[in-house]
Image (cartoon, grey):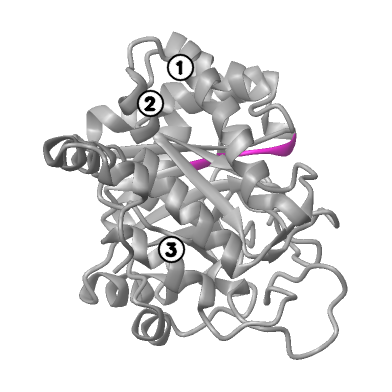
Amino acid sequence: MRTTIRRIRRAVTLSAAALLLPATAVLAGTHLAHAAAGGLTAAPYYMPLDNDPQDIGAAIAASGQKSYILAFVLAPDGGGCTPVWDGNAAQPVASDTVVAGKVAQIRQAGGDVSVSFGGYNGRELGAACRDAGSLADAYQRVITKYSLTHIDLDIEGDDLGDVAGETRRFQAVKTLKQRNPGLHVSLTLPTTTVGLSGLGRDEIQRARDLGAEIDLYKIMAFDYGGPGGSMAADVQKIMAQVHGQLRALRPDLDDAATYARTGLILMNGHTDQPSELFTAATFRTLLGYAQQHRLGRFSFWSLNRDRECTRPTGWVDGKCSSVSQQPYDFAKIVAQYQS
């Protein structure tokens, strides 16, 4: 994920189509998606330390959105294999108390968290650690620190196509799953105008070849240059292409299981691409799409942006949506997916 100003990288009814399904099919599909998402079926991204983070307790109370993906844990900008927040050596995971306090608030409110490793900028631990063993240990320190049952690997930019880094990463995932039975691992990938790029498809295949089980494929359906006037329709077209690609890459999964292993990530308001604009109406339409197909997760980048800008910011800002809105308009829509 990215925004141009950041130092680092960055009770709804079922759709008409769903209403035609037998009740048992609806329940089975819902259970499948819930299981594939590891329980976090609705989970926006939230930067707990950067981009002027909101008070998370107030955000939960105002929006009804309880679960979040915390971004990003990276290697230090100065080098090394130590997990730190936002690539900042002054924000090591090991001595953190601020993020830990927010995790406790989220869980006390009935939600849960995943921690995301990577993003568009900075140095992902998979590129920084010398081998799969040290990488697994680095990831494990974060899992242990926050008692995680979910982690997210956000692979973008130079990390896509880095075969050595991908190999270390997926070997580490195998180790983590052995150490942490039930650990849920999601893989976040960018899209193009034709769905996943060749590099993205190679990433998925490499995980398969190395025997690393990925529980959820999260698709960043933005920043590919879609037409702002028809974003909802364009995203659905992209997601249909991704669905076909995933079916080919995962022949072991049937149609419903593939949807249940797919997460949809949007970006609220203006994106990094001047042609793209996601309004609340766009989100509501795509909520219907997620419900119809029983997607494993519905998410967006990011809670930090879910408020109106109070000053001129240019096209896109990491701290606000650059559109007219009330606080948490987008989180309120995404929160409906968890019900």
In what element is the residue under mark 3? Answer: helix
Above or below, 256 relative to 226: above
Residue 258, disc = 2
Dot 2 falls on a residue whose secondary structure is helix
Give the percent coordinates (x, y) of residue 329: 52, 77
Residue shown at the point (55%, 19%) measured from the top left? 245
Residue corresponding to mark 1: 247
Task: Using the numbered discs, state the Cα–Cα distance from disc 2 to disc 3 in whole angstroms.
Answer: 21 Å
Q: Name the main secondary structure of what is drawn in magenta.
A: strand
Q: Mark 3 points at which residue?
A: 334
Magenta span has 279? no
Q: Evaluate if marks 2 and 1 touch, with contact meaning CB atoms under 8 Å apart.
A: yes
Amino acid residing under circle 3: Val
Residue 337 at x, y percent in the picture = 35, 58
Residue sitting at x 85%, y 57%: 274
Q: In this rendering, would 262 be left or right of 226?
A: left
Above or below: residue 28 compared with residue 339: above
Q: What residue type is labelled 2?
A: Thr
For this rendering, which residue is in front, 226 or 182?
226
Work out which residue is located at the far left of the displayed protein and give it: 24
- Residue 107, visible in the rendered structure: yes
User: What is the x, y in percent for residue 17?
Assistant: 35, 42
Q: In which quarter of the image is residue 100?
A: bottom left
Asked if 22 appears above or below 339 in the picture, the reply is: above
Give how far apart the Cα atoms at labels 1 and 3 are: 26 Å
- Segment colored magenta: 153-157
Q: Which of marks 2 and 3 is nearer the N terminus?
A: 2
**Is residue 295 among what the camera can see?**
no
